[in-house]
Amino acid sequence: MKKMKAVIPAAGLGTRFLPATKAMPKEMLPVVDKPAIQYVVEEAVSAGIDDILVIIGRNKNAISDHFDSVPELEVKLQQKGDHGRLERVMKSSDLADIHFVRQGEPKGLGHAVLRARTHVGDSSFAVLLGDDLIDERDSLLIEMIAAHEATGAAVIALMEVDPAHIHMYGAAAVEPTDTDGVVKVTGLVEKPAAEDAPSNLAVIGRYVLPSSVFEILERTEPGKGGEIQLTDALQELAADPDGPGVVGVTFRGRRYDTGDRVDYIKAIVQLAADREDLGPGLRPWLKEFAERL
Ligand code: UTP
């Protein structure tokens, strides 16, 4: 089987993070000491993917520069004998074969994914949102690729959320299947009001899609928020009895939505507290701080 390519949309406006995102994409915001998007690239690489297309918007250079080598910095670190940092700096330029394509205007996630059509061709592909982090200690993408290989369906990742929060996500109507952790998706609604949501199963930022989704996206009209929504194209796949259908893999691990300010702060605190190099300095202070709240 041909190796799967990954697409990372990172062309959104990041308005929730303004003014930090005025001159920098939100995917470049540091989570401890790496930009969010590097975690996402590393996740794709751990799932066996080595060809990654990043969809970039304005301020494109920050992302492409990050994955490029910086010889003068490398020479400086070498001269200083700072091998630890040198290794970490070089890692980001050596992770995978990373390509970039522009989304001229941020017309929505569906529109961003459609920009990948030429690069992806007629193979199935993975989509990982550049501001959505899955903890590297938990696994999701590998299960999703396996579910796609077993069924041929479009695969989405679902997570149970508080019903009061479902209006911030795509919500799925589902039926059980014979496989544990895999459900059949019978319908999808983008950002429904709590009373209209078919369930509290939220669509999170990982997808494994058949290339037939491109034809659907080509004719998907702007939906919620005036944007071309990937959820609307997937709803069409879910509703087509003659197509490959949509299945969901339920995720119960740790996920951080770094596009949201509170979740972003939680991600930094949790990841830093768990790290061997930073945790010992941070944890006692955190405890003391929590007691003062
Ligand atoms: P979001 O809705 O979280 O991104 O899109 P946003 O629009 O930048 O966020 P706010 O609400 O203004 O703060 C989910 C993902 O899809 C990408 C984003 O970069 C993010 O990774 N996206 C969204 C695009 O690439 N293009 C778009 O037109 C919209």
Image: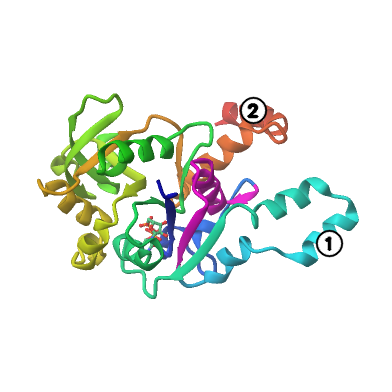
Instruction: State the image coordinates of residue 119 (x, y, percent, origin top left).
Output: 41, 65
Reply yes or no: does residue 40 show up in magenta.
yes
Instruction: State the image coordinates of residue 32 (x, y, percent, origin top left).
Output: 62, 45
Instruction: State the image coordinates of residue 275 (x, y, percent, origin top left).
Output: 65, 33
Q: Single out the residue that lies furthest toward the front.
A: 1
Residue 145 visible here: yes
On residue 75, the disc is 1
Left or right relative to 133: residue 117? left
Nearest-to-viewer mark from 2 and 1: 1
User: Gap in Å between the C-alphas at discs 2 and 1?
Assistant: 42 Å
Residue shown at the point (29%, 56%) measured from the top left: 211
Q: Which residues are magenta?
A: 33-56
Q: Which residue is mark 2?
A: 288
Left or right relative to 133: residue 195? left
Residue shown at the point (58%, 26%) measured from the top left: 291
Amino acid found under the numbered disc labelled 2? Glu
Category of crowding for the residue at label 1, using alpha-carbon neighbours closer than 10 angstroms: few (below 14), some (14–19), many (at least 20): few
Label 1 SS: helix
Residue 20 visible here: no
On residue 137, the disc is none
Q: Tell whether label 1 touches label 2 (CB within 8 Å).
A: no
